[in-house]
Image: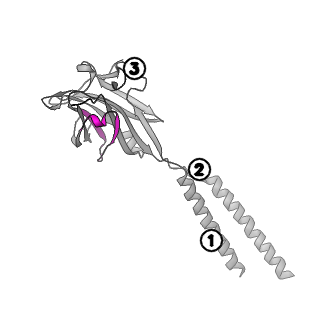
Amino acid sequence: MKMTNTNRFLTGTLRTLCCVVALTSCSAWATLVTWQLNPNSQNGNVGASFADFTSGGYTITARGYDVAGTDTPHELYFKNAGAGEFGLGLVGTLNNELQTSGGTPSNYIQLDLRSILGQGFTGLEISVGSVQAGESFLLFGSNTQGVLGTQIGGAYGSAFDDQFVAITGNYQFISVAAGSKDILPVALRGTITPVPEMSALFPIVGLIAAVSCTQILRRRRAQKTASIS
């Protein structure tokens, strides 16, 4: 009976430990991170065809390109012309926004997602602004830097102006381009659920182990006393 009771107690303790570990893991709630593509509300040249954006310690990179046979880099532009005209565009284009030519994109801005995908981000969404009546934007996915890639979904019209839309597919690079007239990328967002480090669980495990040992010793002493009496 002594061994049976001890085993039952150890089993119960093990179950408690598993529950604590599971609850600790669940306590790392999902976090929504948003990358604004003009975070300092500037209005002027970026000074390069690429720019890094960091939010919550996580970084993405945006690059500008012209569609002309082999896609060529195009200098980025921070645009701030008031409500609805705010985001990341290009230097030297009409209104410093992404344009079309003959119904096809003339240029695009590509977002490099490799870093955040490698860290476990999911549920990525993108917001595009300056989409007035008769204007639209397109999304493209690619696994090669500087290649526009495959169109994702259809054309997003003015109903999606400055609204987050889901990014589908499994691509390392997502590009924004104009479907008609001119548009302006605004922001990207996604969700990450941090995994608690094992070092954070050690104090909990140690406490449970200490309590378990104490309870076992007390039970044995009580049983020994009872048998003597």
State the image coordinates of residue 7 (x, y, percent, origin top left). Answer: 65, 75
* Residue under the point 80% across and 74% down: 222
Q: Is residue 93 visible?
A: no
Q: Nearer the viewer, residue 153 or 47?
A: 153
State the image coordinates of residue 202 (x, y, percent, origin top left). Answer: 62, 53
Q: Earlier in the sequence, mark 2 or mark 1?
A: 1
Q: How many marks?
A: 3
Badge nearest the viewer, 2 or 1: 1
Type of amino acid under label 2: Ser
What is the CA distance from the residue labelled 2 to the residue labelled 1?
24 Å
* Residue under the point 37% across and 21% down: 82
* Residue under the point 35% across and 41% down: 125
Mark sitting on residue 11 = 1
Residue holding disc 3:
42
Q: Quadrant of the C terminus?
A: bottom right
Residue holding disc 2:
199
What is the CA distance from the residue labelled 3 to the residue labelled 1?
62 Å
Left or right, 24 with reference to 131:
right
Q: The residue tagged with tag 1: helix, strand or loop?
A: helix
